[in-house]
Amino acid sequence: MNAEQPERAGLARALTGALILILAFLAYGAAARFLRADGQGDFPVFHDAFRAVLDGADLYASGRGGYIYPPLFAVVFAPLGLLSQGHAAVVWTVLNAGLIFACLWITANEITRRFDAKIDKAVVPVVMLITFAVFADKLRSELRLGQTDMLVLLGMMLSLRWLDKRPILSGIVLGFIGHIKYQSLVVLPYLLIRRRWRALTSTIVSAAAFALSTAAVFGWDRNAEYLRRGVGGLVRLFGEPAVEGAANIFPITWIRSISVTSTLARFQEWADLPAWSLPAMVLVAAGAALAAVMLLYKARGCSLFLRRDRVYDMTSPRAHALVAIEWAGMITAVLVFGPQTTARHMVLLVPLVSMAAMLLVVPRPGIRRLPILAAIVFLLLAFVLPPGSGDDTPALHTWRAVGGISIATLTLLYITIAAALRWSASMPDTPDTAI
């Protein structure tokens, strides 16, 4: 160990401790808020659902009728229904704070590991702090609302961590979080294209098993009804009449949704275009976004889809780095082109921002860090624009209507992919059994 290492290790511990203290402070504020005023945030909806499981009441008609997930989530966390709403919210807040730290830690470690960027012990904590700084306000909202995004993100990152050596476990995690956020199942076509047969099979089988498992609580008939109503609520996204008693999901044109898809849907509605024009516009926009990524890959002598295994060994360090790029890209694509994405959901961009932070922190020949920094700042500004506006002002509605956050997200995505591909091009193409 050289003389610098103890000092860097001390810095790493100090930065990690500082992040833990910040999260503890935010969690304390959120927990105190829940205790002062029951009914705040989204957690009361979950608590009502937990109580419905325990009492045998209608899950989707519980409380404010806002429960939208399949029944698995309510069953797993039903024990919280034994507590009062305020005390259950405190427990959930502590759990959520732990999930935030775990997500930041696992993501930073996995990204730096796959790019062989752990030059010293301080890299991971610095990447974590930069990522936290970008999402500080959104993570605060996660705690104050009592949301579930961190549980989903943790599952996504654990799945990535286990994808190579524990593919069955990776698929089981994906199958579970697919019962919280349907969008997480976007990984299925990726696993198919990449011929990750064990992970793919495990995801499909486990998702089906989790769906059937709640029959042990509700019985076969009621469980089937809950699954129908949970999935049936998705048709509300597209303005179609939902099945009776379906989950109450807002339509695709909801003003709080900042995705490109919602932006185009609002444009279609405003311009009174025919129904077929929306899927056509979304297809063109998504196709153009994908084509841009393919061009970036081609510039680095790599194919995004075809014959990758003929270009270099799929167990090489370079291949492992590319999987990290694509994993972050998939999550980003779901947010940008999903049928409903609010500003709060953008905390799921942690993998993309962590990768950008790594590229910013660790010097590498040929990597220009100024564009990366500018893109990170642009995204951070997009979260808080327009300045001085309240929650329902015309200026904020306009910013949401045009998908301003999605524009900033795509900017960061392309700049990060370009730099990460340049980095990966210098990595060995030969097998690496250590990963």
Image (spheres, grey):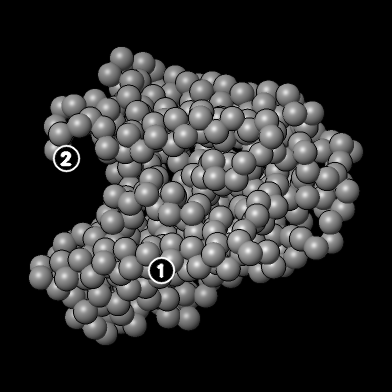
Disc 1 on helix, strand or loop?
A: helix
Q: Residues within 10 Å of mark 2 (few under 14, many from 20)?
A: few
Front residue of this view, candidates 366 and 301: 366
Q: List x then y, in percent, for residue 11.
A: 48, 63
Front residue of this view, candidates 16 and 161: 16
Work out whether mark 2 precedes mark 1 in sequence or the reverse, and give the earlier one: 1
**Residue at 23% across, 30% down:** 386
Q: List x then y, in percent, for residue 21.
A: 33, 68
Taking the image as drawn, is residue 276 in sight?
no
**Residue at 35% across, 20% down:** 268
Front residue of this view, candidates 424 and 218: 424
Q: Residues within 10 Å of mark 1 (few under 14, many from 20)?
A: few
Q: List x then y, in percent, for residue 149.
A: 40, 57
**Residue at 37% across, 64% down:** 18
Q: Which mark is residue 391?
A: 2
Disc 2 on helix, strand or loop?
A: loop
What residue would you read off at disc 1?
17
Q: Is residue 365 left or right of residue 195?
A: left
Q: In front of the other: label 2 or label 1?
A: 1
For the N terminus, the quadrant is: bottom right
Q: List x then y, in percent, for residue 66.
A: 26, 58
User: Up-down: is 160 above or below 392?
Assistant: below
For the C terminus, the quadrant is: bottom right
User: Up-down: is 21 above or below 276?
Assistant: below
User: Up-down: is 278 above or below 82?
Assistant: above
Give the amino acid at mark 1.
Gly
Q: Is residue 169 left or right of residue 427?
A: left
Residue 72 figure quarter:
bottom left
